[in-house]
Amino acid sequence: MTDAPMTAQAASTATAGDILSHHLTAQAGAFLRALPLAVGEVGARPGAASVVPSAGTADLLRAVRRVGGLLHTFGSVFEQTWAQESRTELRWLLNLLALEPGYVRRSARLLGALDSLSGSDPEGTGMLAGHAGAPKARALLDRQLTLARTRAHSTVLQELRSARLHALADRMTLLVGEAPLLEPAGGRAPTVLLPQAAAAFAVLSATAQQLPLHRAATPYGGNGLRRLGAVPAARGTVDADTALAADDAPWARLRILVKRGRYALEVCGRPSSELDELDAVLARQQEAADAAVTAATAARTPRITPATAYVLGVVHADQRLEVESARYAFGRRWSDLQPGPDGWPEFPVEARGHSVAPRTV
């Protein structure tokens, strides 16, 4: 849900504090409305969450992400200790709420992939069709993910009744009334906010430029499976898990920066469908990478048969191919959005001291 942008006349006279308070009040109100719904939904679904979060949980996640993103991108106009504490608590709640739905989506992804690989339909036969290890691998994945989901549900249920959550709700209640703004918030909105939004896009662009997009230049090329990026020397002995974690980390970081860019544009009244698409592609990449880790972990379960381990290895490779497919899709979209005459938002003169060139999304 995106707030409607202010009228041109109101925006031209509004201060940075006016704009930020408008968005924070709306999102804090959404947070407080969604919180009791989310708590009730978690309590009513013991270990049986759906792939898509329920309405209350989804609305709460949406508000948490936007408040956290706003405080990060435009943090210099807020009281620093308050902003840092608020971001820490919002990140805690975000990670907590994402636990159970994450396991549900991972289960659906892995079991769906295994069913496709081991099944037959008019389009053809899966490469694991009739394989003796497929049923056991499916049962193992289902059992392990159900257990992880149940534990996550118990953790979420316990934390949603904690004093920490009540303290965060109190913080959001106060935010509806008045945010602790500093003196710079009294300046004109374009002069104060747009340079900070431009700086966020500069970080996003610099991070994307460091990615090994050349390895994902062809669809399903497989180069990303054969040779991963360099692992920092501080990591010690290099193994496959360490190398994959090091390879995936910049992409996870990039997704966070894309989200911050999205939310910054919403504050500026210029939501971007292109960044929405990039976010969705990076979400698919992240979920496939996490699913591959789960398959690899399951393959190391003691006392499973070689046939079961083989099937789990095939599922792992299938998910890594999904990772490469998503990275290829990102590279295709990113090449059309890199800073230039027609890309990022058209930052006015006040914002042009930054390295992001004016563009129109």
Image (cartoon, helix red, strand yellow):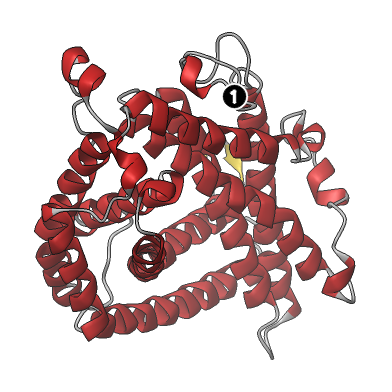
- Taking the image as shown, residue 61 lies to the left or right of residue 291, namely left
Q: Residue furthest front?
A: 183
Residue at 23% in and 57% down: 60
- Taking the image as shown, residue 242 lies to the left or right of residue 203, namely right
Question: In terms of image quadrants, where is residue 17?
Answer: top left
Residue at disc 1, secondary structure: loop
- Taking the image as shown, residue 297 lies to the left or right of residue 263, namely right
Q: Which amino acid type corresponds to the residue marked 1 in the rendered image?
A: Gly
- Taking the image as shown, residue 149 lies to the left or right of residue 133, namely left
Q: Position of residue 42 (x, y in %)?
A: 20, 72
Q: In the image, is residue 40 above or below residue 190?
A: below
Q: In the image, is residue 225 above or below residue 37?
A: above
Q: Position of residue 247 (x, y in %)?
A: 75, 55
Please give the residue where the numbered disc 1 appears in the rendered image.
353
Is residue 95 in view?
no
Q: Position of residue 207 (x, y in %)?
A: 68, 41
Q: In the image, is residue 12 above or below residue 108?
A: above
Is residue 35 in view?
yes
| Position of the N terminus by quadrant | top left
Front residue (pair 48, 229): 229
Residue at 53% in and 44% down: 257
Q: Residue furthest bottom?
A: 303
Q: Position of residue 199 (x, y in %)?
A: 55, 35
